[in-house]
Image (cartoon, rainbow, N blue to C red):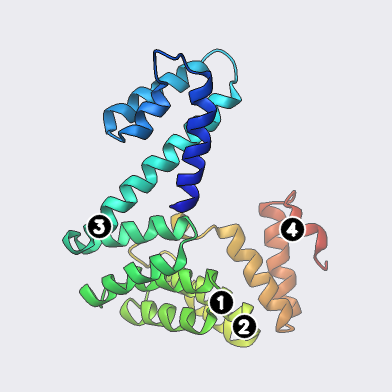
């Protein structure tokens, strides 16, 4: 939050200098008192300033307003973590994961794992956080635990295959992906919502090539070309 406080000071000075001496800007009013009411007034004010034409200055303020409001609400969740239900802790962790705050997300997922050890999703997302921060060993552990707690967890297999590929374990990665594909459409979650099918096809294509299975590689490539002939990733592939 220190960076945000520095930016707040800069923006206060910037917009305070242009505001009327008798009237604070709605942005500064919000900075002085971050209530929901003041947020909405500032939001509507700066949205109005770009209603008819693009106002980049107003757009910057709007972006910053939303960032500050996000941080405020994340602080509320963090300060009340012991009162959150497992599903709310999980959702809180997911926000942190999306923001790239991996260590914080992992800490929240660990709480979920302790509260509900048989719930597969926090294990899967914990694995993603480890993977994105480059801790492949812990990512494998968490993703394998996700599969252990729900054998049909399709997207956990796909992500585990990606992690294993990054580790250079190509044979095991392909075996994992092929096993995961046997559960496609059999899991409680919609596979199309959890994993982009085209991305999965490219992953399988890469693993087939790395394992020297060129006949299957050609079949997979043909399927991709039929599905997305203009995809940029096709340009660098062996045909």
- Residue drawn at x 58%, y 86% is 172
- Residue 35 vs 162, above or below: the answer is above
Question: What crowding class fits label 1: few (fewer than 14 Cα within 10 Å), some (14-19), or many (20 or more)?
Answer: many
Residue 55 is left or right of residue 30, and the answer is right
- Residue 189 vs 28, above or below: the answer is below
Query: What x and y, as percent, mark residue 152?
Result: 37, 74
Query: What x and y, as percent, mark residue 204?
Result: 63, 71
Q: Which residue is mark 3?
A: 79
- Residue drawn at x 20%, y 59% is 84
Q: Which residue is mark 1?
A: 163
Q: Which residue is mark 4?
A: 233
Q: Give the Cα distance between marks 2 and 4.
A: 22 Å
Is 220 or 27 nearer to us in this picture?
Answer: 27
Say which element carries label 1: helix
Q: Which residue is mark 2?
A: 167
- Residue 13 vs 114, above or below: the answer is above
Q: Are marks 1 and 3 in contact (CB under 8 Å)?
A: no
Which of pointers 1 and 4 indicates the residue nearer the eye? 1
Is 127 or 78 nearer to us in this picture?
Answer: 78
Say which element carries label 4: helix
- Residue drawn at x 46%, y 16% is 48
Q: Give the Cα distance between marks 1 and 4.
A: 20 Å
Which of pointers 1 and 3 indicates the residue nearer the eye? 3
């Amino acid at each position: 939050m220190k960076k945000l406080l520095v930016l707040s000071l800069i923006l206060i000075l910037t917009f305070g200098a242009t505001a009327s001496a008798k009237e604070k800007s709605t942005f500064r009013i919000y900075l002085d008192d971050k209530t929901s009411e003041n947020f909405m007034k500032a939001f509507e004010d700066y949205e109005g300033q770009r209603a008819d034409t693009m106002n980049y200055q107003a757009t910057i303020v709007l972006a910053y307003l939303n960032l500050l409001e996000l941080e405020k609400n994340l602080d509320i969740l963090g300060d009340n973590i012991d009162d959150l239900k497992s599903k709310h802790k999980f959702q809180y962790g997911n926000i942190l994961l999306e923001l790239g705050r991996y260590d914080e997300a992992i800490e929240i997922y660990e709480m979920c794992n302790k509260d509900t050890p048989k719930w597969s999703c926090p294990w899967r997302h914990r694995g993603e956080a480890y993977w994105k921060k480059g801790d492949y060993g812990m990512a494998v552990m968490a993703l394998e635990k996700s599969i252990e707690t729900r054998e049909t967890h399709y997207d956990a297999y796909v992500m585990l295959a990606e992690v294993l590929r990054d580790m250079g374990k190509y044979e095991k990665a392909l075996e994992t992906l092929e096993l995961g594909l046997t559960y496609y459409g059999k899991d409680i979650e919609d596979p199309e919502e959890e994993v982009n099918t085209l991305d999965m096809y490219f992953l399988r294509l890469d693993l087939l090539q790395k394992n020297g299975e060129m006949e299957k590689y050609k079949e997979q490539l043909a399927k991709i070309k039929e599905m997305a002939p203009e995809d940029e990733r096709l340009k660098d592939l062996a045909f």
